[in-house]
Image (spheres, rainbow, N blue to C red):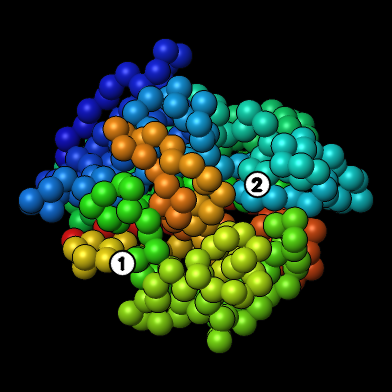
Amino acid sequence: MKIDVAVFGNNGEKLISLTNKKGVTLGISNHGARIVDLITDLGEEQRNIVLGFESAAEYDEIDSYLGASIGRVAGRITGGKFTLDGKEFQLEKNDGDNNLHGGFNSFDRKIWNCEIVEGDEQATVIFSIDSPDMENGFPGNLQQKISYTLTADNQVKIDYWAHTDARTLYNPTNHVYFNLNSQLTETIDNHRLYLDSDFFGSLTEDVLPTGEKVAVVGTPFDFNHAEGRLLEQGFVSDYQQNRLVNGYDHPFVFNESSADAIKGTLYSPDGKIKINLYTDQPSVVVYTTNQLNQPVPMRGSSQVQHGGITLETQGLPDAINHEGFGNIILDPAKDFESTTIFEVIF
């Protein structure tokens, strides 16, 4: 396993690149504990299959969520507030009247501590950071670690761990965007997606969870087919939930299955690459870069509307405010532990 460390900014930001013997390179940064690169060696070309920038400054200036670790709570919290143990907590409102991805200056903008653990068959980078009591409005002193491992068989493994000294909310995710095309400017409407999911969470006109789980059958949200379905179906559909966000920005509820079962697969249009998704989380939020109104400069090219897809494994968004949406409360008596794996096959 080859490991390279490069300067990524002017404030201690680093880019750590892990490369296995099959020519897969995972580039990750302590700026936002984020994924920057995922490069595959196809012989005739080196294909970077995730969106990313070439410096920490670009993330701060253009899109700090891109590839980043998100928290304390991923997604929107309605009204930026919640009630826990009879007490109401008011969070920062950084998305209209709501809280999004933890608030201003959250985990995606932090410089994380990092430790590199080398091995013959895999390499791991462990990122850690503490979040003090009431940071962005969340109670409890939170300790957390997020580790990225690249294995010899092309798995990118993300392990989450957190401990709090007071009951709080915790629902982290990673916000990496995939584009499996050979050119960044090609949209992902030609990608096929499989999800082991029979229900998705619907949204309001304000793009907030309604608290309702809707059956996918007969809708453009039905990706429960082994061979996958084209993402384009949601971009051209007149289905109200697609038109609401100009694509997908919705949670899909995974069906119950064994821990080692494939929960989803993303297929490249040329058949050269696919990504298998494994996770112990109950849902995945699928977002398809819907709000991009003009091309964004990226790696000497540009990112376009519908130019990437996120597969954000997590608990259901805004679960604290919706009965039947699961539990995202973290208790001092039990640490948070979770694993998500993206397996690259080519």
Q: Dot 2: few (<14), some (14–19), or many (≥20) neighbours within 10 Å?
A: many
Left or right of 104? Residue 298 is: left
Question: Which residue is most to the right?
Answer: 86
Residue drawn at the location 63% of the way across and 28% of the way down: 105
Residue 33 visible in image: yes
Residue identifier under label 2: 73
Left or right of 181? Residue 93 is: right
Residue identifier under label 1: 267
- Classify 35 as above or below 199: above
Dot 2 amino acid type? Val
Does dot 1 land on a helix, a strand or a loop? strand
Horizontal and vertical percent position of residue 301: 31, 37
Q: CA distance from mark 1 to mark 2?
A: 29 Å
Q: Nearer the viewer, residue 252 or 53?
A: 53
Horizontal and vertical percent position of residue 249: 58, 59
Upstream in sequence: badge 1 or badge 2: 2
Q: Quadrant of the N terminus?
A: top left
Q: Nearer the viewer, residue 319 or 336?
A: 319
Say which of marks 1 and 2 sits in front: 1
